[in-house]
């Protein structure tokens, strides 16, 4: 039995690149060669871990995992809503008028990555629900919230379809605000609205396409902290599995009671869905051993049919590009452990 | 409330506002979905009704070879129980259908090939063990996505195939019968012509002998004419057969029609004079240039004139006139003969018809001349018709040929198309090469061989005779010949084969003598190495003329 294993996405950027962005700004054409070199090096090291599926480490998402597609738009302002982490905050951009269009689509990252890759490449995109938070509380004159939602869904569809068409192994929709929404609105109304919005996007794809689309949820890791680790998965997962996606990437390594979460997954996963459980924690400094990972996967098979199970990282290793809390070496060491641990589990399951 | 709480509250409020817009979007999407679902249901209902209305059996499978839909006719044609279809197992389904075929393995192999090769379309015939024949057509549902599925269409074509087979069989039999008829006519022609050769030759030679009394020579001339008539009857028979089979190949060239008409007049002139019939000509056409087969064109005019002479009483008159007619050339042959009733005019162009003379053998002939003339004119894209004011009012035949143009310069006299010239004496050519010309004469018809050898020897040639191929080879091995004159139908093989061998072994060329005069026969002769093909009965005059034209130093 082969248990698939996939990364979430981001790998810490080379320090020289981070410094250069700070100095010159991300749009300086002189940085192109550094970006390219960062992608090439990331893919080389990714492949050296034996990972059967890789990403470009999101080296070209020079701001973060969420706003890469809108950074630089003329109709946005930096003073959007703030997201509070344990020790710091991040601020979303705010849209100031319509129409809403992406400035950059993730399939352009895929183009570059596929030039260097020798194994399947996965591509992460931001969820429509995350970007929906860019619309301010007070309606914008001449550009209604409804128009914005329509534009947003169109842009999202175009991005996912382009990635699928260009041969992405999987397209992963980052949905870290799922857990955050429960924190903001314990009634669950906001979460359900996010699920509805993302399902409106997914409904535009065929069943076959959706089997190559996944959704990632986590407590929002950044600078070794999270924005919603305190939210109980029991409040999130039942709704999460209502998403019409074929794959779910769920942070689990950082959970205190994994078995409880696994039971919730067992009770809510649908037969056509696969779940990739997090077996390494990017914000934990210690590198997990392959044996620990093997055991965690084997533990998960007690609750989830092996045919629906995969392994992944709890989160990207550096969702925000300026995050230097984890080194590239640590990230790849953890990935190597995941790959090896998953192989060990596969072997045991195969032998059985 | 601290700043963090404020931020969080405003984010929550804004998000909840957005959720209302999401809800509205969802409602719109659901309405759209409902509409599309209804459209789809309608479309599906139409499709099902269409499938049900066709007499073909239709099966649609998806990329995993599972049944998507089928019509009742499909189940009925293959007598597949519903449970087999509903089991949706391709192996069971394929086994059920293949076992009804004459060759189940072939059926399965073909299906597997179609699926494996993802053929955009396929078409074949299935023979069932119960005698039925199904036409099977399949097509990918989406040519760009072979895995989307395929539609299979089955049509019961048993009756059509059986009818086609019956028709094909009938056609084959008819063709076979036609060929047998052609062969029979060819053989008949050969058998009729062969005995005429020695008679004709001897009559000609004797007629040339001035020491014989005049009345004897006139009798001989009469014999010659009658032999000529018989040959013409045979020629007509062969021509009408070839024309009706489309086996006549034209050799068109730009000719001066007036010149060709003049030649045709010359041929019938003696016959007309005998009946004291005058032939007037009025060549008014300025555009008398035509692209025609000159021999066939002459044949048309000659047939019309011969017909006119035949049906015009002694002392009558025949006129032949030409005129321009809007890019066509019109030729009219007008006689003062017995005429034709209006209701019988079209019949005269039918083979073997002789209007009003059906029971009157005064006029002779077998009634093929006009049919041949019309067929040849039609082949040239022209038209021919006849008109008569009635019995004893004479007849006018009008022929029109398309593409009339200025006649070519330099061929406006008869010399460009030499006519048959009877009775020319043999030029003294026997010593062309500085010594006597030695001919190998091969003929199995003893009288013909004897007469030809005698006449040619008297003409100064050195003749070595052979009755068959074996003797011919023996003679060729021990003598050096300038030329071979050979019959084609020999007892121990074909003269064609003989010529090929003699050409290959000794570089010899030859003249073919054959009772077979169809175009294909002549072409085969030339391919074998003959440089002339003379159709029996061969006149000594004709043979001499051909020999006279040969340059023996180059043979």
Image: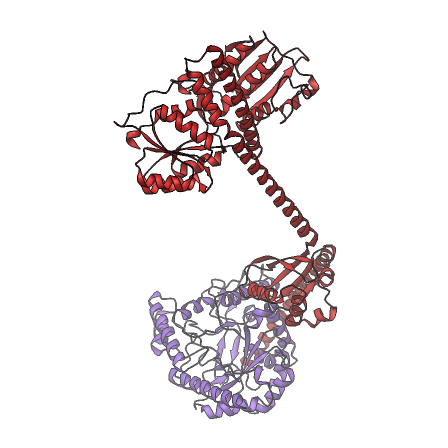
Displayed quadrant of residue B303: top right
Asked whether, in this view, residue B53 is left or right of residue A326, the answer is right
Locate residue A59: give its quadrant. bottom left
Give the x, y percent position of residue A163: 49, 67
Chain seen in red: B
Task: Say above or below: B133 vs B513.
Answer: below
Chain (purple): A
Is B24 or B342 nearer to us in this picture?
B342
Q: Is residue A299 left or right of residue B488?
A: right
Using the image as rendered, state which of residue A189 and residue A337 is in the foreground.
Answer: A337
Vertically, is A284 above or below A176? below
Identified at 33% across, 24% down, the residue is: B460
Locate the C terminus of chain A by quadrant: bottom right
Residue in the picture at 38% in, 84% down:
A329
Q: Which image quarter: residue A269?
A: bottom right
Image coords of residue B214 (percent x, y)? 46, 10
Give the image location of residue A125, x and y in percent.
50, 71
């Amino acid at each position: 039995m082969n248990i698939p294993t996939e990364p979430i996405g981001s790998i810490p950027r080379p320090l020289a690149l981070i410094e250069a962005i700070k100095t010159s700004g991300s749009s300086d054409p002189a940085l192109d060669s550094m970006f390219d070199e960062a992608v090439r090096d990331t893919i080389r090291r990714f492949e050296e871990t034996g990972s059967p599926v890789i990403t470009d480490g999101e080296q070209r998402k020079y701001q973060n995992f969420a706003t890469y597609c809108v950074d630089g738009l003329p109709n946005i302002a930096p003073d959007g809503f703030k997201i509070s982490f344990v020790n710091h905050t991040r601020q979303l951009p705010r849209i100031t008028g319509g129409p809403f269009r992406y400035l950059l689509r993730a399939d352009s990252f895929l183009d570059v990555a596929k030039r260097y890759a020798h194994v399947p490449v996965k591509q992460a995109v931001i969820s429509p629900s995350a970007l929906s938070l860019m619309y301010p509380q007070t309606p914008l004159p001449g550009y209604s919230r409804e128009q914005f939602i329509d534009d947003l869904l169109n842009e999202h569809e175009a991005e996912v379809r382009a990635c699928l068409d260009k041969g992405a192994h999987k397209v992963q929709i980052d949905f870290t605000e799922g857990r955050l929404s429960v924190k903001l609105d314990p009634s669950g109304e906001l979460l359900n609205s996010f699920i509805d919005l993302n399902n409106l996007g997914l409904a535009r794809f065929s069943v076959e396409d959706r089997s190559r689309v996944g959704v990632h949820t986590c407590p929002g890791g950044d600078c070794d902290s999270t924005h919603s680790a305190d939210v109980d998965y029991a409040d999130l997962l039942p709704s999460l599995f209502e998403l019409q996606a074929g794959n779910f990437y769920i942070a689990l390594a950082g959970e205190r009671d994994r078995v409880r979460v696994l039971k919730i997954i067992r009770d809510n996963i649908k037969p056509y869905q696969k779940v990739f459980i997090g077996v390494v924690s990017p914000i934990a400094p210690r590198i997990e051993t392959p044996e620990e990972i093997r055991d965690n996967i084997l533990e998960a098979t007690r609750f989830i049919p092996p045919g629906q199970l995969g392994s992944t990282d709890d989160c990207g290793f550096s969702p925000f590009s300026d995050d230097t809390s984890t080194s590239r070496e640590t990230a790849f060491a953890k990935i190597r452990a995941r790959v090896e641990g998953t192989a060990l589990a596969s072997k045991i399951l195969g032998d059985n | 409330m601290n700043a963090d709480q404020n931020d969080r509250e405003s984010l929550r409020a804004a998000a909840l506002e957005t959720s209302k817009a999401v809800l509205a979007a969802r409602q719109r999407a659901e309405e759209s979905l409902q509409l599309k679902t209804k459209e789809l249901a309608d479309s599906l209902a139409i499709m099902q009704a269409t499938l049900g209305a066709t007499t073909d059996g239709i099966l649609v499978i998806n990329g995993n070879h599972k049944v998507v839909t089928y019509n009742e006719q499909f189940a009925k044609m293959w007598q597949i129980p519903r449970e087999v279809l509903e089991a949706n197992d391709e192996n069971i389904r394929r086994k059920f259908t293949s076992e009804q075929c004459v060759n189940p393995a072939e059926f399965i192999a073909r299906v597997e090939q179609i699926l494996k090769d993802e053929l955009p379309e396929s078409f074949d015939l299935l023979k069932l063990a119960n005698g039925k024949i199904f036409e099977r057509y399949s097509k990918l549902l989406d040519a760009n996505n072979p895995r989307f599925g395929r539609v299979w269409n089955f049509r019961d074509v048993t009756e059509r195939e059986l009818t086609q087979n019956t028709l094909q069989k009938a056609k084959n039999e008819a063709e076979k019968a036609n060929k047998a008829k052609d062969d029979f006519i060819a053989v008949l022609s050969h058998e009729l012509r062969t005995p005429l050769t020695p008679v004709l030759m001897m009559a000609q030679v004797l007629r040339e002998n001035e020491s014989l009394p005049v009345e004897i020579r006139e009798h001989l001339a009469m014999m010659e004419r009658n032999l000529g008539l018989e040959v013409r009857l045979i020629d007509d028979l062969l021509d009408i057969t070839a024309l009706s089979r489309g086996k006549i190949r034209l050799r068109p060239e730009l000719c001066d029609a007036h010149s060709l008409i003049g030649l045709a007049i010359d041929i019938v002139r003696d016959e007309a004079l005998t009946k004291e019939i005058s032939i007037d000509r009025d060549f008014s056409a300025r555009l008398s240039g035509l692209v025609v087969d000159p021999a066939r064109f002459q044949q048309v005019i000659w047939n019309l004139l011969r017909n006119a002479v035949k049906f015009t009483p002694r002392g009558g008159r025949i006129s032949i006139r030409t005129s321009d007619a809007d890019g066509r050339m019109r030729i009219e042959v007008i006689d003062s003969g017995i005429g034709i009733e209006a209701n019988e005019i079209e019949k005269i162009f039918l083979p073997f018809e002789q209007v009003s003379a059906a029971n009157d053998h005064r006029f002779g002939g077998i009634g093929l001349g006009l049919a041949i003339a019309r067929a040849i004119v039609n082949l040239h894209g022209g038209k021919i018709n006849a008109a008569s004011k009635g019995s004893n009012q004479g007849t006018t035949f009008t022929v029109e040929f398309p593409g009339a143009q200025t006649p070519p310069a330099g061929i406006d006299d008869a010399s460009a198309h030499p006519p048959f010239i009877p009775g020319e004496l043999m030029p003294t050519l026997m010593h062309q090469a500085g010594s006597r010309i030695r001919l190998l004469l091969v003929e199995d018809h003893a009288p013909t061989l004897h007469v030809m050898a005698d006449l040619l020897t008297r003409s100064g040639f050195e003749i070595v005779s052979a009755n068959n191929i074996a003797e011919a080879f023996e003679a060729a091995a021990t003598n050096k010949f300038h030329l071979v004159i050979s019959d084609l139908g020999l007892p121990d093989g074909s003269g064609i084969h003989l010529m090929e061998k003699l050409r290959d072994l000794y570089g010899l060329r030859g003249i073919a003598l054959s009772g077979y005069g169809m175009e294909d026969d002549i072409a085969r002769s030339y391919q074998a190495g003959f440089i002339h093909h003379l159709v029996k009965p061969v006149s000594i005059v004709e043979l001499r003329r051909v020999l006279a034209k040969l340059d023996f130093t180059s043979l």
